[in-house]
Image (cartoon, coloured by chain):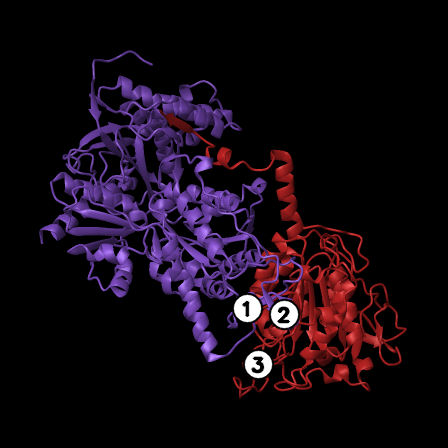
Chain colours: A red, B purple
């Protein structure tokens, strides 16, 4: 494959291995001919529109983009994009994408998954993809419910959730996906909201700019089985008071009047204090140590009255696929390309006339 | 070497079966491997059977912890590692206890008398000392104080200054090897070189092992215990260059060769599991061939990554054993639906569940055949000998890439770890299996050229393989049913029926692309057919030889392709009065044969974790012939 690195879109050392588009691409170029079949009003529509609108920005050839998904409502996503795509099996998309990304450095590989797909049946693969830092962009749509199986609680549902499978209330404590990803030492962790196109685009752009695994949690409304799960973050009158928009290098201040701030409490956790208080923290997404980012991930509406969105962590680290492909090129450089016959006749041989 | 004590008789034999047995930590595998290496260099035909417990260091001194290595070598071509040893080397009472039941009366026995202490006898479960209580009367026993002589030899040797008693004692396996090398006239230069290389970083340990090896050789020469030594002349084998190879190594090389012949980079996604891990180890060495190996977080991720790589245009491979296949089932079904190439290597072991990890069994034929939801046909290829794993791997990869399908390669623990001389292939004789990706649209729609991912090749029924990066052919595939041709999601009943039948027909059609089943019936008068598959080839063929030597008639056929069967299989089966199918399971091939051909085949089945013995099969065969 020919590789050109002078494209004008988003760039990083791995994305630069992906061929550029010969001409400007538009949203239409990324829209497939398939009829979209999510429920009317589903948050997935907004995410799809944002992704279709954002992909041309990358400036890379659409044929060098692959979307891999698992099972669930969100996992129908690849069918609606005019790129290469695979709708695979439940929970396994990160594993499948790992093989694709590792063997094809000239591709931009994206995973689309949901809270059940990524955190329940596929939890193990997600953890290991994050740990290895494979060059994947993982978009996890979190609607805090099982949609495609019609309304059972998910690993991100709040405790006590009344659903078809938990008529007396769910018993298990939910995951915090951002904490989970940071715990696995993911090199890029972001969070955004389906309906906030500008913010979502900014996080997706940063994810694309990141060489390595990027994990993006997208709060997504399921209007059929869990409607309004994120309403306080969306409601114009309340959202600014309960949303902390993270910006690297900026003080952690929020509120409609900019009157609230974050600092470290005596026990090491974070607390909300009036802006102007001493010790207000500055967001450090690129810090090598993920501790402060992890502490930020522990802020929730239920516990602190605030939910951070944006980029929690973004650090440049060696990626698995780069390292493997370097081993191959190093071996070829040092030992020369392999010769089949000298390989199989290695060791002790004897000849019979 | 030392002065000759007296004239000894050298007896010429046409074949010998040797078995080394000791504690798991005694180095018996290495000893057996090295004796085999000497034997291969000498030019004998040979077959080996390592036999060891699953525990890395099983309880020392107990029969559960005994590790054994059996070698059969000869001056003619042989097919099995031998039914019973002619000579057993027992390093301790437990090794004696575990192996004596397989030792025929009159066989030679070399015992390490130093190990026959009260404690060791108790651990082995001997109430009285078998060296003195008459237990060993039926055998030709050589009592050798192996441990003490090894320690003395090591400490007397030059260059072993800092080697302590415990380290010296660890060289006792080399004393045993030296003695056996003398007794059976094996060349010794290779072993000395091997030890010097193996312990190159520890010259004193190397010196200790060489000293023990030489001391064992010299002990044979000087002691009066041995009145006869044995010679087995080199075998007359087909001309060419040979090496000794295990099944797992041959299979690894076959995969590398397949990548080259097909023209695709290999991607192995795997999770460690006995007895398949050695393939992962081997392929991970071959980066210069462009082989990517990925040790995944689990079996599912291993096959998932391989399938992802296949989507990208690599030859995706996953290696595992029975329990791993169970975990991979859903992804194999996905590969059937996606119609992408994938080779699933299953080194079968005793089951169910964890079963017998280090023991062989033809455990997974039905799992490979049926272990998925829905109608999910997968071709199955099985090698018949360690060396044949090379060709079988190429064949599995050929079918996978040509027909865009997952393919099972069913080896087993016996083939994996067993070894034989292997006639090296000649590069020019290997087939060109190049596959081409689709690069152009294959359909004209109302708006112009389109790419239809499920528009099939009319001959093979394979779908086009267009890899990401190909402009204009962007498409989506998935496990949800697709419309014939166009490849859009389809819930149409008639389409699903058609797609199920198309996938079945594609796999069934492979029968026209594989060699017909061959029958060996030297007299042409056989009325009984012995049918087998996989690693039972050796004992079945050896059993047939024995029966024919008695003047009886028997035909033998061995299946390499289990799904689909060769096109002439039914015709062959129906042309015999009786069909006998020996299997190391409870009749899995027999079930398939009966179902497909309505032939009432007779089974002979055992699941003891060990290969069949030639004499055992000969006996069964005679019974069937004479019934």
The residues bearing labels 3 and 2 have C-alpha atoms spaced at a distance of 25 Å
- Residue neighbourhood size for the residue with mark 3, other residues' Cα within 10 Å, grouped as few (<14), some (14–19), many (≥20): many
Up the image or down, B530 lies above or below A175; here it is above
Q: Residue furthest top?
A: B3
Q: Check the picture and name the quadrant holding the C terminus of chain B.
A: bottom left
Q: Residue furthest left?
A: B627
Q: Which mark sits nearer the N-terminus, 3 or 2?
A: 2
* Residue nearest the observer in this picture, A117 or B515: B515
Q: Are marks 1 and 2 in contact (CB under 8 Å)?
A: yes
Subunit that carries the residue with mark 3: A
* Residue nearest the observer in this picture, A329 or A160: A329
Mark 3 vs mark 1: give the one in front: 1
Q: Which mark is residue A153?
A: 3
Subunit that carries the residue with mark 1: B
Residue B322 point in image, percent of width and height: 39, 57
Residue B223 point in image, percent of width and height: 25, 19
**Image point (53%, 88%), residue name:** A167
The residues bearing labels 3 and 1 have C-alpha atoms spaced at a distance of 26 Å
Q: Image quadrant of residue A255?
A: bottom right
Residue assigned mark 1: B478
Compared across the picture, whether A349 is left or right of A205 comes to: left
Residue B385 point in image, percent of width and height: 34, 43
Residue assigned mark 2: A78
Q: Which mark is residue A156?
A: none
Subunit that carries the residue with mark 2: A
Compared across the picture, whether A146 is left or right of A245 comes to: left
* Residue nearest the observer in this picture, B341 or B64: B341
Q: Image quadrant of residue A118?
A: bottom right
Callout 1: helix, strand or loop?
strand
């Amino acid at each position: 494959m020919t590789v050109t690195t002078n494209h004008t879109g988003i760039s990083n050392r791995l994305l630069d291995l992906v061929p550029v588009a010969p001409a400007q691409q538009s949203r239409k170029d990324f829209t497939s001919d398939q009829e979209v079949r999510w429920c009317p009003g589903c948050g997935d529509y907004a995410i799809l529109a944002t992704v279709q609108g954002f992909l041309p920005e990358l400036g890379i050839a659409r044929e060098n983009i692959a979307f891999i998904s698992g099972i669930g409502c969100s996992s129908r996503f690849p069918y609606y994009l005019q790129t290469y795509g695979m709708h695979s099996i439940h929970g396994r998309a990160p594993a499948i994408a790992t093989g694709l990304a590792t063997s094809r450095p000239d591709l931009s590989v994206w995973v689309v998954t949901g809270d059940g797909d990524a955190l329940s049946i596929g939890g193990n693969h997600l953890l290991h993809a994050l740990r290895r830092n494979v060059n994947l962009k993982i978009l996890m749509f979190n609607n805090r419910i099982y949609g495609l199986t019609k309304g059972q609680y998910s690993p991100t549902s709040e405790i006590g959730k009344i659903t078809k499978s938990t008529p007396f209330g769910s018993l298990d404590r939910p995951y915090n996906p951002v904490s989970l990803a940071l715990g696995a030492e993911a090199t890029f962790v972001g969070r955004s909201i389906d309906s906030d196109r500008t913010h979502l685009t900014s996080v997706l752009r940063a994810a694309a700019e990141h060489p390595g695994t990027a994990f993006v949690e997208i709060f997504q409304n399921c209007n059929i089985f869990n409607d309004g799960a994120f309403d306080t973050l969306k409601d114009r009158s309340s959202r600014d008071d309960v949303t902390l928009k993270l910006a690297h290098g900026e003080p952690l201040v929020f509120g409609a009047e900019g009157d609230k701030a974050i600092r470290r409490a005596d026990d090491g956790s974070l607390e909300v204090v009036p802006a102007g208080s001493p010790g207000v923290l500055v967001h450090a997404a690129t810090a090598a140590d993920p501790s402060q980012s992890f502490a930020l991930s522990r802020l929730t509406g239920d516990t602190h009255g605030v939910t951070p969105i944006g980029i929690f962590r973004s650090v440049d680290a060696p990626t698995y696929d780069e390292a493997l492909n370097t081993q191959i090129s190093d071996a070829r450089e040092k030992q020369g390309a392999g010769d089949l016959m000298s390989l199989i006749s290695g060791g002790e041989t004897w000849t019979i006339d | 070497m030392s002065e000759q004590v007296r004239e000894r008789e050298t007896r010429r034999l046409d074949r010998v079966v040797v078995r080394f047995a000791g504690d798991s930590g005694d180095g018996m595998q290495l000893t057996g491997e090295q004796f085999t290496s000497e034997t291969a260099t000498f030019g004998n035909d040979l077959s080996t059977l390592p036999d060891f417990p699953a525990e890395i260091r099983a309880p020392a001194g107990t029969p559960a912890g005994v590790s054994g290595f059996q070698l059969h070598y000869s001056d003619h071509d042989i097919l099995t590692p031998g039914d019973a040893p002619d000579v057993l080397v027992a390093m301790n009472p437990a090794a004696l206890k575990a192996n004596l039941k397989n030792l025929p009366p009159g066989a030679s026995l070399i015992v390490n008398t130093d190990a026959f202490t009260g404690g060791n006898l108790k651990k082995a479960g001997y109430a009285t000392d078998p060296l003195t209580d008459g237990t060993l009367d039926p055998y030709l026993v050589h009592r050798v104080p192996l441990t003490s002589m090894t320690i003395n030899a090591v400490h007397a040797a030059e260059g072993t200054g800092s080697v302590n008693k415990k380290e010296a004692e660890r060289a006792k396996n080399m004393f045993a090897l030296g003695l056996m090398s003398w007794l059976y006239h094996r060349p010794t230069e290779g072993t000395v070189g091997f030890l010097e290389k193996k312990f190159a970083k520890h010259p004193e340990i190397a010196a200790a092992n060489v000293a023990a090896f030489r001391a064992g050789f010299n002990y044979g020469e000087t002691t009066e215990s041995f009145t006869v030594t044995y010679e087995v002349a080199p075998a007359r084998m087909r001309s060419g260059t040979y090496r000794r190879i295990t099944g797992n190594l041959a299979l690894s090389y076959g995969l590398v060769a397949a990548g080259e012949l097909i023209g695709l980079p290999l991607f192995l996604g795997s999770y460690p599991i006995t007895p398949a891990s050695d393939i992962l180890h081997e392929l991970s060495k071959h980066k210069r061939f462009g082989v990517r190996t990925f040790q995944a977080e689990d079996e599912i991720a291993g096959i998932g990554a391989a399938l992802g790589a296949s989507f990208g245009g690599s030859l995706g491979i996953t290696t595992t054993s029975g329990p791993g296949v169970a975990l991979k089932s859903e992804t194999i079904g996905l590969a059937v639906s996606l119609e992408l190439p994938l080779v699933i290597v299953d080194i079968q072991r005793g089951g169910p569940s964890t079963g017998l990890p280090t023991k062989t069994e033809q455990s997974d034929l039905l799992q490979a055949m049926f272990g998925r939801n829905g109608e999910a046909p997968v071709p199955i290829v099985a090698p018949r000998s360690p060396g044949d794993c090379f060709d079988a791997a190429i064949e599995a990869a050929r079918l996978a890439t040509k027909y865009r399908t997952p393919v099972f390669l069913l080896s087993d623990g016996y083939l994996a770890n067993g070894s034989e001389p292997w006639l090296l292939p000649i590069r020019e004789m290997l087939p060109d299996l190049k596959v081409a990706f689709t690069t152009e649209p294959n359909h004209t729609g109302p708006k112009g050229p389109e790419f239809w991912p499920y528009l099939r090749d009319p001959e093979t029924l394979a779908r086009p393989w267009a890899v990401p990066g190909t402009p204009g052919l962007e498409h989506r595939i998935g496990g949800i049913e697709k419309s014939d041709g166009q490849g859009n999601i389809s819930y149409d009943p008639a389409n699903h029926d058609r797609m199920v039948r198309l996938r079945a027909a594609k796999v069934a059609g492979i029968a026209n692309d594989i060699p017909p089943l061959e029958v060996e019936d030297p007299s042409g008068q056989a009325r009984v057919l012995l049918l087998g598959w996989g690693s039972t080839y050796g004992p079945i063929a050896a059993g047939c030889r024995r029966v024919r030597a008695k003047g009886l008639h028997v035909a033998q056929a061995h299946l390499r392709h289990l799904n689909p069967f060769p096109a002439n299989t039914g015709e062959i089966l129906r042309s015999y009065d009786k069909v006998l199918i020996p299997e190391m399971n409870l009749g899995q091939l027999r079930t398939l044969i009966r179902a497909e051909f309505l032939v009432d085949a007779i089974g002979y089945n055992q699941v003891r974790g060990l290969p069949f013995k030639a004499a055992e099969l000969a006996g069964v065969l005679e019974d069937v012939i004479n019934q």
